[in-house]
Amino acid sequence: GQQLNQSPQSMFIQEGEDVSMNCTSSSIFNTWLWYKQDPGEGPVLLIALYKAGELTSNGRLTAQFGITRKDSFLNISASIPSDVGIYFCAGGLTNAGKSTFGDGTTLTVKP
Amino acid sequence: AAGVIQSPRHLIKEKRETATLKCYPIPRHDTVYWYQQGPGQDPQFLISFYEKMQSDKGSIPDRFSAQQFSDYHSELNMSSLELGDSALYFCASSPQGNYGYTFGSGTRLTVV
């Protein structure tokens, strides 16, 4: 089936630093989504991307839908301690309700 | 704002027992999804429903079944539980065609 590869698997950064993570797939998606998950909680949608090339921001977060439709990246600027968590990308296809999740990037922010 | 409600939050069952997980979607969301997340794993899609009909099926074991009721709530029924079924089970809902789901807080199932 479709697989999404996220990198890096984990990141340890200082508070205030910028973060960049990406997601690649061997197949195309029509939708790219970025979620954040805190321990023991459900993933929370951060940004949804619906068009190839689309660049969308949500506060300190910026994400882009790759032109090839096989990749996406998420940037976090000026990280703060509450950014800690696992970030998942997910890809969706038209007429298929499910999203396929990447394997996650674990972010640790040192104060 | 109302969120996706899942119950119970925690469930402990013995092997070979049966479990029922419930999900109450956000009002006016007509699509419900179930995901399973093992320890340290990404969420794996199990099954989805749109307007009370199954709309997509993923890696759901035959021992599991699910349905969506007339009030749009959904139940995941799991029989002959195995140790490997221990996981977080998430329900998510969305309006049809919107991939930006809202997830519930999950049910942590432990099979002993």
Image (cartoon, coloured by chain):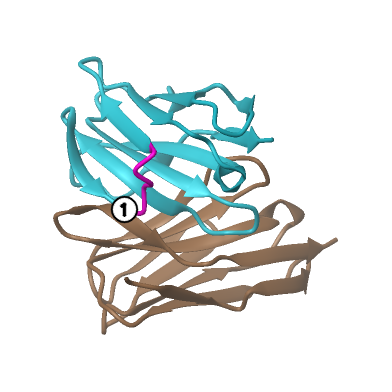
Residue at 36% of width from left, 47% of height from top? Answer: B60
Q: In the rendered image, which quarter contains the C terminus of chain B?
A: top right
Q: Is residue B51 visible?
A: yes
Q: Colour of chain A?
A: brown
Q: Is residue A44 magenta?
A: no
- Label 1 Cα crowd, 10 Å radius (few <14 / some 14-19 / many 20+): few
**Relative vertical location of residue A108 with respect to residue A21 in this rendering, above or below:** above
Q: In the rendered image, which quarter contains the N terminus of chain B?
A: top left
Residue at 16% of width from left, 59% of height from top? Answer: A94
Amino acid under disc 1: Gly
Magenta segment boundaries in residue numbering: B58-63
Q: Horizontal and vertical percent for residue A93?
A: 22, 62
Chain depicted in cyan: B
| Residue that badge 1 annotates | B58
Q: Is residue B61 magenta?
A: yes
- The overriding secondary structure of the stretch rendered in magenta is loop
